[in-house]
């Protein structure tokens, strides 16, 4: 994910009326699509602790399912949830850059016969079952003292940060729904990126 330095954007907007018009057109055209899902997945109390190269994350992720995702789950559709951590670097002259560190993957299912919600963490193959969707989502959101892999060597004096993004999507979408999902926030949920500056 790329972040644009606001000072650069302000400078460019002052210098180019055409660029300003294009950016505003894109913003208004895409704003219902880009920002509609914001707030359905939120990071709470996001913090990074430790010393280089080993850090750990303390956070809780709050998931709120859309009506479509809740109904899909109850009707046998598997949902995939991802929490992605990236190492980012602020750059003053152009776009910030980042590279992936780790993606934690989960699978959510509903077992109709037992009326249990099933949660599986894909990287460790841990399994849990719950009597309610709220309990499953609470467990899904727990990331307390989660160890990140050792960071690659970073240059001293550079501004680095840990970026976290979370989302949830159905494991499969038929073609008409796949097309609709590009224009609606009902078919998937995602968070805004949150970051923690590294010392």
Image (cartoon, rainbow, N blue to C red):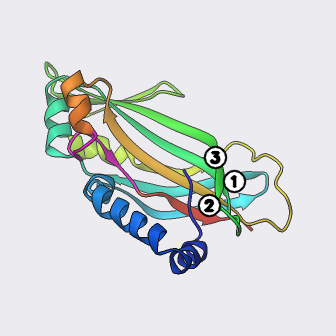
Q: Secondary structure at mark 1?
A: strand
Identify the residue at image location x=79%, y=51%.
53
Answer whether labels 3 and 2 touch (C-beta < 8 Å): no
Horizontally, residue 138 falls left or right of residue 103, namely: left
Question: What crowding class fits label 2: few (fewer than 14 Cα within 10 Å), some (14-19), or many (20 or more)?
Answer: many
| Residue 153 seen in the current view | yes
Circles 3 and 1, Cβ within 8 Å, touching? The answer is yes
Above or below residue 37? Residue 71 is above
**Where residue 127 appears, x then y in whole percent?**
40, 27
Q: Nearer the viewer, residue 185 or 54?
A: 185
Q: Quadrant of residue 149?
A: top right
**Disc 2 from disc 1: Cα separation:** 7 Å
Which residue is disc 3 drawn over? Answer: 147
Residue denoted by label 1: 55
* Circle 2 residue: 48
- Mark 2 or mark 1: name the one nearer the start of the chain: 2
The disc at residue 1 is none
Q: Is residue 194 above or below residue 13?
A: above
**Magenta segment boundaries in residue numbering:** 182-191
| Residue in view at x 26 percent, y 56 percent | 36
Identify which residue, 89 or 68, lies in the foreground: 89
Identified at 67% across, 63% down, the residue is: 94
Tell me the element at label 2. strand
Q: Position of residue 72 (x, y in %)?
A: 17, 31
The quadrant in which residue 93 appears is bottom right
Tell me what residue is drawn at x 48 percent, y 57 percent. 193
Mark 2 in CB contact with mark 1 (< 8 angstroms): yes
> Gap between marks 3 and 1, in whole Å?
6 Å
Position in image of residue 143 (x %, y %): 49, 49
């Amino acid at each position: 994910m790329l972040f644009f330095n606001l000072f650069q954007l302000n400078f460019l907007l002052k210098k180019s009326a055409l660029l300003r018009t294009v950016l505003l057109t894109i913003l208004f055209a895409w704003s219902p699509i880009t920002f509609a899902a914001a707030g359905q997945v939120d990071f709470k109390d996001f913090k990074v602790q430790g010393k280089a190269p080993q850090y750990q994350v303390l956070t809780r992720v709050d998931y709120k399912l859309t009506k479509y995702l809740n109904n899909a789950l109850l009707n046998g559709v598997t949902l995939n949830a991802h929490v992605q951590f990236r190492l980012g670097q602020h750059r003053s002259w152009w776009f910030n850059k980042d590279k992936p560190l780790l993606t934690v993957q989960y699978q959510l299912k509903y077992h109709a016969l037992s009326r249990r919600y099933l949660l599986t963490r894909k990287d460790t193959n841990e399994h849990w079952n719950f009597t309610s969707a709220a309990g499953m989502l609470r467990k899904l959101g727990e990331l307390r003292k989660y160890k990140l892999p050792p960071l690659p060597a970073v240059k001293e004096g550079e501004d680095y940060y840990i970026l976290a993004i979370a989302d949830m999507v159905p494991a499969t979408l038929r073609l008409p729904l796949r097309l609709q999902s590009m224009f609606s926030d009902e078919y998937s949920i995602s968070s805004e990126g949150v970051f923690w500056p590294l010392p």
